[in-house]
Image (cartoon, grey):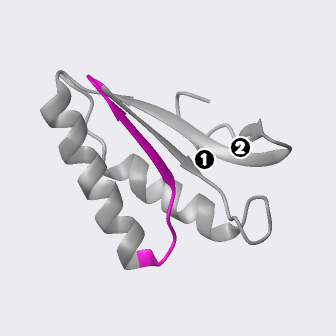
Amino acid sequence: MTESYVGCCEGRTREDVLTLEREFRFRNFSEAMAFSVRVGMLAESEGHHPEIVTEWGQVRVTWWTHKIRGLHRNDFICAAKTDRMYAPPG
């Protein structure tokens, strides 16, 4: 699901757990890392923590709720907030 978490609510399955995952593209590692930090700050403020994988020019963010081994309303809220923080390279 690369366009939007909320727009395509199918998610992905990992180890039989439904997740919301999106890859965000950037011009370089520095921009990718800065976005990762912003997502981390969001996660701390929400008390809900995704998996964040940062690589050169991209960040993959995966939301799901560990406790219920699936998706909760909070996952969709945090995913939407993450989407709003992203500004595609232009």
* Depth check, front residue: 36 or 3: 36
| Residue on which disc 1 sits | 6
| Residue on which disc 2 sits | 9
Residues under labels 1 and 2: Cα distance? 5 Å
Residue 60: where, in percent of width, then height? 45, 36
Query: What residue is at 27 percent from the left and 29 percent from the top?
Result: 88
Q: In this view, does 23 lie above or below 40?
A: above
* Label 1 environment density (alpha carbons within 10 Å; few <14, some 14–19, many ≥20): some
Tell me if 70 is positioned left or right of 49 in this view.
right
Residue 62: where, in percent of width, then height? 56, 46
* Depth check, front residue: 84 or 45: 45
Query: What residue is at 71 percent from the left and 40 percent from the top?
Result: 11
Find out whether residue 49 is within the magenta segment: yes
Tell me if 36 is positioned left or right of 80 in this view.
left
* Depth check, front residue: 18 or 2: 18
| Label 2 SS | loop
Furthest-right residue in this view: 16
Query: What residue is at 41 percent from the left and 67 percent from the top?
Result: 43
The count of marks equals 2
Query: What residue is at 36 percent from the left and 77 percent from the top?
Result: 45
| Label 1 SS | loop
* Label 2 environment density (alpha carbons within 10 Å; few <14, some 14–19, many ≥20): few
Instruction: Identify residue type, mark 2.
Output: Cys
Quarter assignment of residue 37: bottom left
* Depth check, front residue: 54 or 87: 54
Locate the C terminus and report the quarter of the image it occupies: top left
Instruction: Identify residue type, mark 1.
Output: Val
Tell me if 61 is positioned left or right of 27 in this view.
right
Q: Do the residues labelled 1 and 2 touch (CB within 8 Å)?
A: yes
Residue 46: where, in percent of width, then height? 44, 76
Tell me if 23 is positioned left or right of 76 in this view.
left
Q: Which residues are drawn in magenta?
A: 46-57
